[in-house]
Image (cartoon, grey):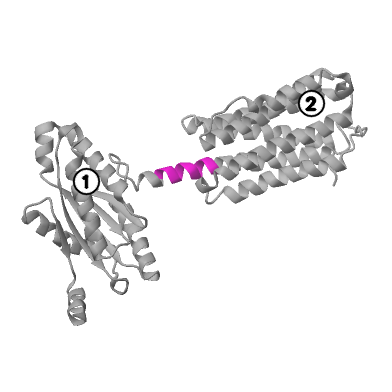
Amino acid sequence: MSLDVYTLFICELFVLGFMSIIMLFAWAGSQYDRVLGFTTVALIATLLAMMLSSLRSTGHHFLPIAVGNVILYFGYGMLVNAFRTFRGLPLGINWLTGALLWAILCLFPQFYFSLPKRVIVTCLLCIIFTAVLIRLLYGARTLLPATYWPAQLLLVIHLGFHVARLFLDAGRPNMLHGAIGGTQFTVWTMLESMLFVMGLTFTILAMVNERTRLVYQQASLLDPLTGIANRRALFAEGNKLADWCRRHRQPLTVVLFDLDHFKSINDRFGHHQGDRVLLDFCRVVSQALPPQAQFARLGGEEFAAVLSLNEQEGKNWCEQVRRAVHDSAPEQVIYTTSIGMTAVSPTRIQDIESLLVAADEALYRAKTSGRNRVEVFTPLAEKSELANQL
């Protein structure tokens, strides 16, 4: 069964209208997400442009050719804004280029009354806009581990269609019964645009949903006050680092920090100043972190770090942090930290939970031995091995 242009036109109007309603409700349900907002405007603009295009069969030219296409490229510009917003980029004014260029070209009769020339410019503008979307999406690939490739495939197919149309659409008017203006290639154009609109609508919804999920997932791994990793993230990433050290035969050091007399800081200077001390401590440690390291807040004034260092390197690093903390004194508030650490060779690397228990024992010794000091816990197996070597 063959479909004429009129049948496809009705189908496309229905698809555009239905997709616009879906996106409108999705936009409202997402607390007016700007990406969905721009996409909604793009769909409504495309729907209006399609409605105006039907006037060509009644002998009208200005509304379908000039106004309709200006609105169409305004819609493409809205898609560019949606993708730029998704990337967190400023909008600028380049999104207006397509609509302005078409409006200017319509001032010239050689273009306005030439269907082949209009087809060529239409194809080129669609190719340019789609290439821009592909480039913007490429910059967001790290944010879209699941939907990136389906979205890129959809855009590449859309770009390829308009490249093919440059060579296949000669711009000959469609004289068939029921046709609504356009060329003999219009049936394929409508079919492709209908599929593209449906695919793009659901793809953008999936992209926004994936981005939101990743944002919440990332937030669940961060301490809300300091912005560093929390306990859950430390165990996940710390065990990954332990596995990496085991595979690459690198030593592993686990460190626990406890801010000395932190309760007295809150009592003397207030909780606001206590929070500033916590932030300052995170700044000091983060600046001192070597490559292949994880740092996290376990809760309250207790922190932990997992590093790919041997025992002597780990002890030197802990001393460096201890001195830097003592010397930092944010807003003249002097504070110190007690540090407990343990280090193991690649062949004796255990899970992070076990090593934290050992580091906690060393931290306890540091606190009972006067605080503001570094204590090292060496497992018995390591001590025996060291004694045999001597």
Mark 1: few, some, or many residues within 10 Å (few <14, many ≥20)? some
- Residue at image position (55%, 40%) is 205
For the stretch drawn in magenta, the main secondary structure is: helix
Q: Is residue 1 above or below residue 382?
A: above
Q: Is residue 384 above or below residue 32?
A: below
| Residue 179, quarter of the rendered image | top right
Secondary element under disc 1, as helix, strand or loop, is helix
Say which residue label 1 marks.
324
Range of the magenta residues?
207-216
Secondary element under disc 2, as helix, strand or loop, is helix
- Residue at image position (13%, 54%) is 373
- Quadrant of the rendering where the C terminus is positioned: bottom left
Indicate the amino acid at tag 1: Ala
Say which residue label 2 marks.
53
Indicate the amino acid at tag 2: Ser
- Residue at image position (24%, 65%) is 311
Which label's residue is closer to the chain start, 1 or 2? Answer: 2
Q: Position of residue 149 (x, y in %)?
A: 60, 51
Callouts 1 and 2 close, C-beta under 8 Å: no
- Residue at image position (62%, 39%) is 201
Q: Is residue 68 above or below residue 122?
A: above
Q: Is residue 179 left or right of residue 314?
A: right
Whole-number angstrom distance, CA of label 1 to CA of label 2? 70 Å
| Residue 374, quarter of the rendered image | bottom left
